Image: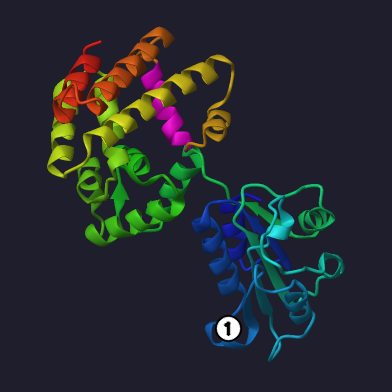
Amino acid sequence: MEYTQLLKELNQHKISSLYLLYGTEEYIIKNVIEKIVSASLAEEERDFNYSIYDMKETPVELPVEEGETLPFFGGKRVILMRNCYFLTGVKDKEKIEHNVSYFEQYVDNAPEETVMIVTVSHEKLDERKKLVKKLKKQGIVLDANPFDEKNMMQWLHTYVHGSHFNMTDDAKQKVIQLAGKDMMMLSSEMEKLSLYIEKDGEINEEIVEKLVARTLEDNVFELVDHVVNGRSEKALRIYYDLMKQNEEPIKILALLARQFRIILHVSHLKKTGYSRQKIASQLKLHPYAVKIAEGQAGKYNEVMLKNVLKELAEADYKVKTGKFGKSLQLELSIVKLANL
């Protein structure tokens, strides 16, 4: 089931007896757990009827046995089973032995009074396992892996719609660029922006630039974009700012080379017919980063990109062998690449 559809059902208090949440987006899993618990239990019921088990430390029999007992004072009982790596192909180093067949029997006849939430922070389940098949058949399943740009933008629209402010499209694109590495970071930055803006105010790109924290990688990402588009003055301005922050030129050089390698890989994979999502999976990148790289790749052919990487490799050699000053060499390379 899709994340937005699941939230809609939970907001309508449509509750299942079994939930299987897996994937690497911790924010999505955490958010859905909170919604399930809120929809199932009143605040005063949680001390008695909400239990959390770490399956790296607890055999599966314990939460299953609790799931089979009636909740206190009627109503519902909620049980959260975290770190269920026995559902994946990961070889767990823990010495806990799980009676999986006992859990399978529970899944076949899950009591309506208990809401069992099964989670694992892993991108894939082992589809060959009998328990995985049973959970998928009997329960509600959410794949909480990274959003593509479309879903991230949809999440932003929903967030803004339920808030006290408006947000321009350019601002949305910018906040995804700066904070869209994962949903936890994006959510945190949106909370910060919402606290800054007054009621019925509007968040524009300038406000996002001002408030959203930038990493070194973000600055290099923007530097590369200026280089690709021939904006040497703007590229150098970012570089000088990084120097003022005492960033190491060799590290910046390495990140520049990494970004141009990404552009080269994206260009090659796109020509072979890979979709944006498939490229992102192959290169272990966020789909938005792939989108930007696609646009940047359009400025070069494959030979030009290889020449860029050759220039950066030569600059790296000159710096590391002491043939040229680190800062000056990188400055010269930025100007040279921006004028290709």
| Residue closer to the observer: 28 or 326 | 326
Task: Please provide percent x and percent y for residue 101.
Answer: 86, 66
230 relative to 177, above or below = above
* Residue visible at 41% across and 24% down in the picture: 261
* Residue visible at 16% across and 44% down in the picture: 245
Q: Secondary structure beneath disc 1?
A: helix
| Residue closer to the observer: 296 or 337 | 337
Q: Is residue 181 visible?
A: yes
Q: Is residue 289 magenta?
A: yes
Task: Please provide percent x and percent y for residue 162.
Answer: 40, 58
Task: Please provide percent x and percent y for residue 87.
Answer: 73, 56
Q: What residue would you read off at disc 1?
A: 46
Residue lying at the far bottom of the rendered structure: 73
Query: Callout 1: 10 Å neighbours few (<14), some, many (20+)?
Result: some
Tell me which secondary structure the magenta stretch mostly adopts: helix
Q: Left of 60 or right of it: where is 164?
A: left
Give the extent of the magenta segment. 286-297
Q: Is residue 301 magenta?
A: no
175 relative to 278, above or below = below
Q: Quadrant of the C terminus?
A: top left
| Residue closer to the observer: 337 or 43 | 337
Q: How is the image coloured?
A: rainbow
Looking at the rendering, which quadrant does residue 272 occupy?
A: top right
Which amino acid type is marked by label 1?
Arg
